[in-house]
Amino acid sequence: MRIENSFIPVRGVGEKTERQLWEAGITHWDEFERSAVGETTADRIETYIAEATDRLDAGDSRYFDASFPSSERWRLYENFREEACFFDIETTGLDSSYADVTTVSIHRRGETTTLVRGQDLSAEALREHLADAPLLVSFNGIRFDAPFLEDSFGIDVDAPHLDLMYPCKQLGFSGGLKQIEKDVGIERDRPDLSGRDAVRLWRQYERGDDEALDTLVSYNRDDTVNLRTLADDVSSRLHDDVFADVQSPL
């Protein structure tokens, strides 16, 4: 699913009208025909397509983040995935008022960077890695990771944000990231480790165990890299669901 397959950002066009367009063979902006809808709706669609084409050419992900319903934000993924920033954090607890961020892993353009507390984890480093990303991708990052970073480092994590927890729920998956990885067939090197182990490993590192930090970093990096695999899988499944009984445009 690409942004160009979508018509629901247009005022007055809901899922029903969009599906009617698709069923009529209009699955891409370039295929739009005014006769498929009423005059007022046709005017709105043509106006939107003209503006959205310019915004897409400019790589303006914020424009589409604002125009799509939040439940359909996954539709931005295909267009921006090559520049998307996948991120995950580990902390010493669940509340930023008393807990610390220990590691932050960021996967982008095929490269993974892990920032470590007391070494290179800082507000400046986070801004450098997150600032120009057209799309952030996380799991439960809207409720946890992003606000935790904002509280802990005084930064704004305000780029368009695809939190995979929500499209996973749309597909009927439940549980945390590890469980959903199992459900969709994603493997990891240390499936026995959990968030509780991440806290334990950090405490061991604080007591001088460098190997514990290596394990923690590996665990955090797996979380982050697997987000790319999960996002690919989830967007493909949602695409198939959305275009069920309709000739796919991809």
Image (cartoon, rainbow, N blue to C red):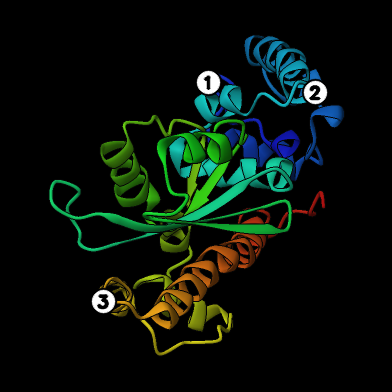
3 vs 2, front mark: 3
- Residue 105: horizontal and vertical position, in percent? 51, 58
- Residue 49: horizontal and vertical position, in percent? 74, 19
Q: What is the number of the mark on residue 12? A: 1
Outermost residue, bottom direction?
Answer: 192
Residue at 65% in and 30% down: 7
Q: How crowded is mark 3: few (under 14 residues within 10 Å), some or many (20 or more)?
A: few
Q: CB atoms at circles 3 and 2 under 8 Å apart?
A: no
> Which residue, given by chain and number where applicable, does mark 2 sit on?
57
Residue at 62% in and 64% down: 237
Image position of 91 (left or right of 49): left
First in residue order: circle 1 vs circle 2: 1
- Residue 53: horizontal and vertical position, in percent? 77, 21
What is the CA distance from the residue labelled 3 to the residue labelled 1?
A: 60 Å
Give the vertical position of 200 relative to 111 (above or below): below
Residue at 65% in and 12% down: 44
What is the CA distance from the residue labelled 1 to the residue labelled 2?
A: 25 Å
1 vs 2, front mark: 2
Image position of 41 (left or right of 100): right
